[in-house]
Image: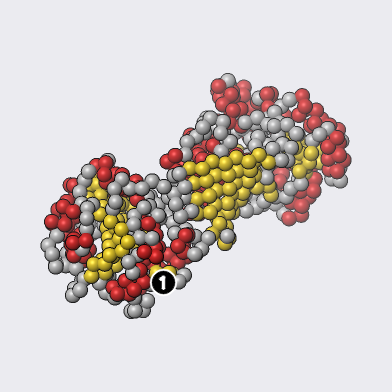
Amino acid sequence: MEVPKREYQALILVGGLGTRLRPHTEQVPKPMVEIEGRPFLEFKIESLRKHGIKDFILLVGHLGEKVEEHFGDGKRFGINIQYSYEKEQLLGTAGAVKNAEHLITGDFIVTNGDTFLDIDFEKLIDLHETHNSPFTLTVAPASHPKTQELVEVFNDKIVAIHKRDTPDHEDHLLKIQDPYVNAGCYIMSKEILSLIPPNKKISLEQEIFPQITHKMNGFSHPGYMLDVADENDWDEFIKDVRQGLIAPSISGYKKIIRSRAPVRITFGGGGTDIAPYDKSFGGLSVNATINKYVYSSLKIRDDRKITIRSDIINMHEGFESYSENFDRIDSIKLDKDNKLNIIKAAILEMDPQCGFDLYVRSEVPPHSGLGASASLCVSIIGVLNYLRKKNRLSKHQIAETAFRIEQNRLDNLGGRQDQYAAAFGGINLFEFLGEDNIRVNPIEISKDYLLEIEKNILLVSSGMKGKSSGQMHKEEKENKLYEDNEKIKRLHNIKETGFEVAFNLRRGNLKKFGKLIRESWEKKKSFNPEISSMYIDAIVEEALKNGAVGARLMGAGGGGHLLIYCKPDQEHKVRQVLNARGAQAVDFSFDFEGLRVWEVEE
């Protein structure tokens, strides 16, 4: 962990009356109300201490002796604590800071005692020192912009502060989609104290800020923030502590957040979800998720370090383990051909504001034709999304984020069917209408027909590694297959077969459904013959000669898994024949949940 360039004192305002939290605040100040046996102020102090802040001044007033009784000089917490008492009257935020002037040695941090922000203080201090300004104000995304005082920031400078119920406030709301508010954490130089008269009730926000707005820096904090104002906020903070989202080293709780995202099998339409075809003509895919998953497990750390470990299954059922460690998220880099690139790209995209240990395991190997890379991405987004206090992503947004990561950060060109299948789960007809305009149409199938499909269908590993879908789609675009009129007609035919697949699934016409699987494969080969091989063609022909109705290869081709639909009570014969050729059947059932995220205690 980096340490600040110079020592900073932290002044914490803990002198308020806490009237909205009564009866909890009748015996102790609001920051001393206990959560899981520990006062709120402990969490607050820990959030600074873990960033190297060790010198504290607690600005106390109402029941301040209760604070001193608990914390003393701070030695048992590994810090130094001094106290500044408001002896006769409440002095307000600025007056309380002025009252502690005799204890302040240099530039200092001021933060509200009833607000919790997991700020990266190293970055905050670095911005303050780089700009050499007398005042740096932390801002955060507004949670209730219509009723909050808004702060306008440009190029790390505070441009204006818009008070509520004013024309400026309304104008700013119209211009800015995601406005900022004062987050209640500042760095000040001692020169600001000369603006504050002694022994007088005065507010930083209302009376000092208007004098120095033109001198103020703005530091954006996108992470966790909760202003504890009333009982509802308190309950919310308790919940977050119990989930392990807040200062796990001091809370006594160790939570592990887990997720799983299923892989998919495709029945029809694959290839029409690719740009520019989807935007010009509308694409579709009929697919189903199965009970083979990519799992992620995340444990929050009490520092900013990030560790990644991944066990990747290979085609021979063994595992290859890969790991990397980083001091902080800024040190994560994407390296060519790095086995952990998808994981690292997902972390960079989601930008979590804490350190953590992440372990990932997939039940299917890469290049299996089952969309495992998209499921991996969705699974990781799932646990990182769970960490967010606000602005959590919907399933649609999770799928889009996974697609964007692969397209933009990894240059892995492709469609969206894998990401949407992993996020939503089930048997669906997905319509792709260009960019992020996607319709999810669940296909309702009776339980009896579902059982019949699971009985008759085989998922078979060819024993050969499939091609990268990104590379295949890149080659198709380079060869301008999506601009060839004859090829476009063939994509139209693939799409039409996809509609027929969905129709016959809904009707329970399973014999026709099986034949359409074969038809969709033949049409896909006509679009790009390079997706198959003599070995794959031989497996398909062997299956058809021994009781299969239809068969097709999953994914980008070359290898991976085949989907084979058999005549009733012939599936065991097909399985045996293909096994003799080295193609192993994989037992599975359908998944109807998609991405799942849960938590357990360590």
> In front: 549, or 264?
264
Q: Quadrant of residue 509?
A: top right
> In front: 388, or 194?
194
Q: Quadrant of residue 324?
A: top right
From this viewpoint, is residue 258 visible? yes
From this viewpoint, is residue 146 visible? no
Q: Where is residue 427 shown, x and y percent of the image?
A: 66, 47
Task: Residue at 44% x, 44% y: name it.
Answer: 328
Q: Quadrant of the C terminus?
A: bottom right
**Amino acid, disc 1:** Glu
Task: Residue at 68% x, 45% y: name it.
Answer: 363
Q: How many marks?
A: 1
Q: Where is residue 417 shown, x and y percent of the image?
A: 59, 40
Disc 1 residue crowd, few under 14, some 14–19, many 20+, Cα 10 Å = some
Task: Residue at 25% x, 54% y: name it.
Answer: 108
Instruction: Find numbered disc 1 in the image and state the secondary structure of the residue it sits on.
Output: strand
Q: Is residue 369 above or below residue 140?
A: above
Q: Where is residue 193 shown, x and y percent of the image?
A: 16, 57
Q: Is residue 489 above or below residue 305?
A: above
Q: Is residue 95 above or below residue 566?
A: below
> In front: 25, or 584?
25
> In front: 461, or 204?
204
Task: Residue at 84% x, 43% y: name it.
Answer: 571
Q: Where is residue 220 shown, x and y percent of the image?
A: 33, 48
State the residue position of label 1.
34
Q: Looking at this rendering, what residue extends furthest in the front direction?
A: 75
